[in-house]
Image: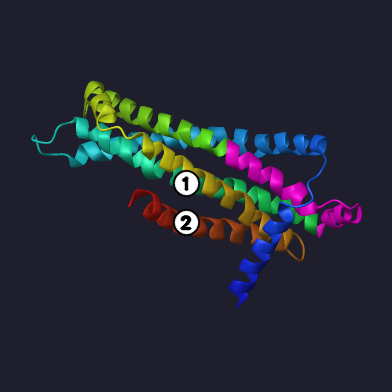
Amino acid sequence: MNYIEHIGKYFIMLKQVFTKPQRARVFKEVLFREIEELGIKSLGIISFISFFIGGVIALQTALNLESPFIPKSLIGFAAKRSIILEFAPTFCSIILAGKVGSYITSSIGTMRVTEQIDALEIMGINSLNYLVLPKIIATIFFYPFLVILAMFLGILGGWMAGVLSGLFSGADYVIGVQTDFNPFLITYALIKTVVFAFLIATIPSYHGYFVKGGSLEVGQASTQSVVWTTVVIVIANYFLTQMLLT
């Protein structure tokens, strides 16, 4: 019953998020601040991890292709599919759930325990709309660009790994990347990214907004928000794959 209660409170929160919007000027300032905090400041970690994970995927594929009858171009093909289908949208979203989710929960939770949210309510401001909606818009519109960057850098990292290790040639890798290219796979990845971005913005916001206690409880809520965001992303990934690819 406790889980049902939390699910109900979560959807009630979403209803309040999308009602009674604030003035456009105030909302615009908050939105650009959230884009910087939740998106631009995540460029470094996503770029670094994408590049090296792409290289690891290519190297592991090459090391497992021992038969001389299997063309080396299959390495590029397998790396491309792995990066576009799962690594870029799902793995990067889980990384962002840890980095961004803990930040969202701690920032909103701190405002709750220091009674700043109560002050907003007293001034007649819809605190959920003011605090959560800019985060939703920032993540939904910016994270697809992060995922496209992750795809590019992951594939580039695979190419660099082959060139530097000598396990396969760059030309064979490029041929594999170009083989049987299906544009819908990128669309599929971006659809998943938008759904995951919404979850990354709202689930940590829920944990931060309804936290009770002090700084210790805020830390516990941050941990719980990361865990539950990751769990829901994995479950949503399964159902999205079922609906979009089968």
Residue at disc 2, secondary structure: helix
Q: Residue at x 61, y 37 (%)?
A: 39
Instruction: Out of 89 and 213, give the one closest to the viewer.
Output: 89
Residue 125 numbered mark, or none: none
Residue 192 numbered mark, or none: 1
Specify whether residue 65 is painted magenta: no
Q: Are marks 1 and 2 in contact (CB under 8 Å)?
A: yes
> Magenta segment, principal secondary structure?
helix
Report which quarter residue 152 is drawn in. top left
Magenta region: 113-141
Image location of residue 18, percent across then percent down? 71, 51
Q: Give the residue type at disc 2.
A: Ala
Instruction: Out of 219 and 176, give the one closest to the viewer.
Output: 176
Residue at disc 1, secondary structure: helix
- Where 222 sits versus 42, above or below? below
Residue indicated by mark 2: 236
Q: Outermost residue toward the bottom? A: 1
- Where 133 sits versus 69, above or below? below
Q: Closer to the N terminus: mark 1 or mark 2?
A: 1
